[in-house]
Amino acid sequence: MKIVMIGSGYVGLVSGVCFADFGHEVVCVDKNPAKMEILARGEVPIYEPGLQDVLTRNLQAGRLTFSTDLAAAVGGADVVFIAVGTPARRGDGHADITYVMDAAGEIGKALTKYTVVVTKSTVPVGTNRKVLAVLRKNTSIDVDVVSNPEFLREGAAIDDFMRPDRVIMGVESARAKAVMRKVYHPLIQCGIPIVFTNSESAEMVKYAANAFLATKITFINEIARLCEHTGADIAAVSRGMGLDGRITEKFLHAGPGYGGSCFPKDTAALVRIGQDNAVPMQIIETVIKVNDEIKHRMIDKVVGLCGGSVAGKTIVVLGVTFKPNTDDMREAPSLTLVPALAAGGADVRIVDPQGRKEGAVLLGDAAWYEDPYAAADGADAVVILTEWDMFCALDLARLVAGMRRARMADLRNIYNPKTCFAAGFEAYVAVGCAPLARGNPVGAPV
Ligand code: NAD
């Protein structure tokens, strides 16, 4: 099949190269010429494990090309995917579907034969009908629209795309359904469940799933706070809850609040969809508020660890991307914490294996280090904010050896406080257990 992918960001690029790997002929299109040049050379402009190999393989096989010419790519295609961004609209939280609608208009003008246009971007309920209307306004050629939301996770995107839990398709014509079966044939062959439904349901599945996961994270973070005030240990509580087969352990790790390119904007958009339909999304409204408070509470934790003020202190932040194995900084907790520490008078040093390109722009004049031990030399506190592998097995004694004051804020609950004290840390704070100084409770929980 001839597939065109409009938008070659995290989702479009991964989807495009994976469809090529399924054996389809794929053209990835993007408005950004610099990005297309990099890709055409066989290089990957984002950090995503495994992506380089699949890209190289399919470029060499001649199944994958890159272009900025949407019209040339779309003419003659069997299926055109729209995978452009749908950021939160400034000011009101609505999903901004301008890029989707613009792409639909351009696609409509370029169609030369019956084509299935598939929306992969996350779009508010009702958008696919609007996409169809725009297409029909711009062409008299027969066209069908399918809603096919994407669930891949950055950092595990290739695996998620090749072996998804399910594929959701809002499709209302038998002809388009047959085409989509061909597109996803390799997954259907492996027994991956495919849910065919109408476009509104497909659109809703995506928002409901992301809002549910954001709620689960926020729930455990709120329980973590209660643990801090009651002497309960969140690690045991998460494990005890997660072993319940109805709950499961996933998304039950307490931390500094969710961020990223999806949960914040999708929860905000769901609230707006509720308002538009006079159905208040009260749970999600609360989740957004609580998550924001949690991010700010991390500031209090670090300030408390430093004795009530970070002025004049050197603080090392380990990890600034919103999660490990991605270079994506969108809505990362670091965007709240690092500026607050700097505003409080701290000298902030950052170590992140992939975050520097974006982070250097977003995080002001923090100093960037490659090596956590070099960064900790002369520091007053270390804050673990993103659980990159390289921060999960640190030589703690070596870290302590160079520090002026050996204090740790372990905001991903990676280390055991006893291990930290044995290595020489004088104070330790995590999420969901009381702050400790060499084994004794210290200060008030925040
Ligand atoms: P992104 O910002 O990384 O990429 C979007 C790309 O689209 C950009 O490169 C931009 O230049 C391009 N673009 C915009 N308009 C265009 C046009 N008319 N023609 C050609 N290119 C155009 O976005 P993303 O993170 O890949 O997200 C895309 C969509 O997928 C969003 O709706 C998002 O919510 C959804 N989604 C994202 C993820 C994720 O993990 N990032 C997961 C699931 C779903």
Image (tube, grey):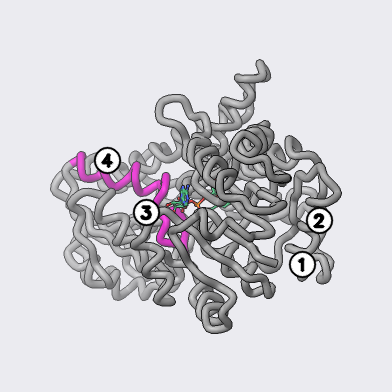
* Residue for badge 4: 340
Tell me the kind of residue under disc 3.
Ala
Badge 4 or badge 1: first in the primary sequence:
1
Marks 2 and 1: in contact by CB < 8 Å? yes
* Residue 392 located left or right of residue 381: right
In the image, is residue 210 above or below residue 89?
A: below
In the image, is residue 362 above or below residue 15?
A: above
Q: Give SS at disc 2.
A: strand
How far apart are labels 3 and 1 at the CA level? 43 Å
- Region of the chain picked out in magenta, as a range: 322-344
Q: Nearer the viewer, residue 234 or 109?
A: 109
Q: Give SS at disc 4.
A: helix
* Residue 327 located left or right of residue 360: right
Tell me the kind of residue under disc 4.
Ala
* Residue 400 located left or right of residue 410: left
* Residue for badge 2: 194
* Quadrant assignment for the N terminus: bottom right
* Residue for badge 3: 409
Furthest residue in direction left, as rendered = 312
Quarter assignment of residue 100: top right
